Image: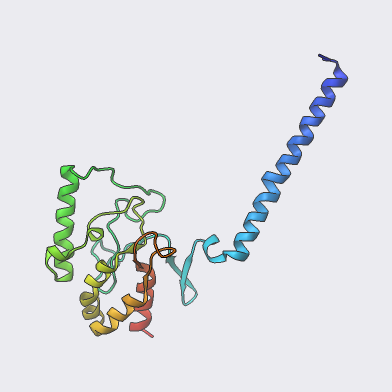
Amino acid sequence: MDFSVANTGRLLWAALRMLLALTAVTGIAYPLLVTGIGQVALHDQANGSVVKVDGKEVGSRLIGQSWNVPGTDRPDPHWFQGRPSNSGYDPLATGSSQLGASDPRLVKAVKEARTQVADFNGVPESAVPTDAVTGSGSAIDPDISPAYAHLQVHRVAQANGLSVAQVQKLVKEHTQGRTAGFMDQQRVNVLEVNVALKELVHP
């Protein structure tokens, strides 16, 4: 094997050229290409699916948030409520509680949550759906089941001075079907339905 200075120099120069070429392709050209495609073809999703009301950002369709009475930890009866969040809806601290289904702490928390949801909405505990008392794996799920949305209709209607029919129509209009017709479950995006609710109450 030739270990001469000239041969070593050629090998180093070849390696440097390869490094520069790969850096240009994978570190500059490819990211710019993907970013450009995202901005053109999927602009909304590429920018976080942000929702704006009157020019002001109010949240993202992809991230759940609390709908409490301002300055408190009490849920606001005027708004549809999302699923419980182990992280307090902090997108930087996602993750479930990691408690097993038979863990006494989880069983207790679910029972307490079921009682609270039932009392808050004026319904029997047996009517409270599972997603109303259990968090998602990410702890920031932006959607709820149609069953949980409909359970809240009477309370939302009364708090906002609307008819039950008006609020039911709102939920129906914001119920999304299964992805591709067979994946996932039907769902209601809490932010979107609350934005529509605000427009209905304050047109």
Residue 50 drawn at (x, y percent): 48, 66
Name the residue furthest front. Answer: 182
The quarter of the picture where the N terminus appears is top right
Q: Nearer the viewer, residue 182 or 199?
A: 182
Q: Nearer the viewer, residue 2 or 97?
A: 2
Residue 28 drawn at (x, y percent): 69, 48
The quarter of the picture where the C terminus appears is bottom left
Name the residue furthest right. Answer: 6
Relative to 191, is 128 on the left or the right? left
Q: Nearer the viewer, residue 68 or 24?
A: 24
What's the residue at 25%, 54% (across, down)?
Answer: 134
What's the residue at 37%, 49% (across, down)?
Answer: 94
The image quarter in which residue 65 lies: bottom left
From the viewer's perspective, is residue 99 above or below residue 154?
A: above
The image quarter in which residue 200 lies: bottom left
From the viewer's perspective, is residue 188 above or below residue 92?
A: below
Total residue callouts: 0
Residue 75 drawn at (x, y percent): 24, 65
From the viewer's perspective, is residue 126 above or below residue 94?
A: below
From the viewer's perspective, is residue 105 above or below residue 71?
A: above
Snapshot colouring: rainbow
Relative to 64, is 104 on the left or the right? left
What's the residue at 41%, 65% (across, down)?
Answer: 181
Residue 85 drawn at (x, y percent): 30, 55
Q: Nearer the viewer, residue 176 or 167?
A: 176
What's the residue at 47%, 77% (across, down)?
Answer: 54
